Amino acid sequence: MPKVTRIGVTFPPELLKDFDEIINKMGYESRSKAIQDAVRLYVSDRKWIKEEDTVQTGVILMVYDHDAKGLESELTETQHEHSSIITSTLHVHISEQDCLEAIAVKGKASEIHHLSDELTTRRGVKILKTTIVTV
Ligand code: NI
Ligand code: NI
């Protein structure tokens, strides 16, 4: 394998602008190094996804638009379907429009991964972070 591989990536302009502002403030000399660091962090955060059969514990943190048509009942339905790995759910009304839900999960990594993907791909879900605690 070569030492480095060059890839082409497209960005929404707003995202790139925010990214550049942050990495300039941080003192990065090139975008490449900053993007490599970001991807490395992304991979490290998701290492657990590869360990499908082990039991993991963590929290799914989700922000969604409660005005999105049908979303709230879909989210509830999905959580009922996966109630065997959900230990508790906390709901916070952030603003007129947005809700935050913290879903505590304990179960096989593959099931947590499945649940997390099922929620994050719904239209109206704005942010979803799955944090697995490794002790
Ligand atoms: Ni709410
Ligand atoms: Ni499912």
Image: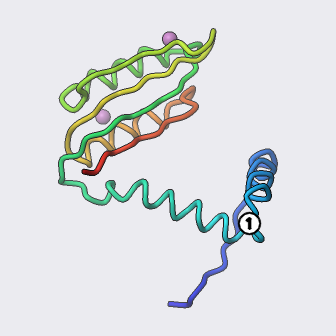
Tell me the amino acid under the disc marked 1: Tyr
Q: Is residue 18 placed above or below 89 in the rendered structure?
A: below
Q: Residue at x 51, y 64 (%)?
A: 40
- Relative horizontal placement of residue 104, taking residue 7 as reference (left or right): left
Q: Is residue 21 placed above or below 73 in the rendered structure?
A: below
Q: Residue at x 51, y 59 (%)?
A: 41
Q: Is residue 86 placed above or below 27 in the rendered structure?
A: above
* Image quadrant where residue 10 sits: bottom right
Local SS, label 1: loop
* Image quadrant where residue 125 sits: top right
Residue picked out by circle 1: 28
Q: Residue at x 25, y 41 (%)?
A: 57
User: Ligand 2 is located in which of the four quadrants?
Assistant: top left
The chosen color scheme is: rainbow
Place of residue 59 in the rendered image (x, y in percent of width and height, measured from the top left)? 35, 35
Direction top: furthest residue: 96
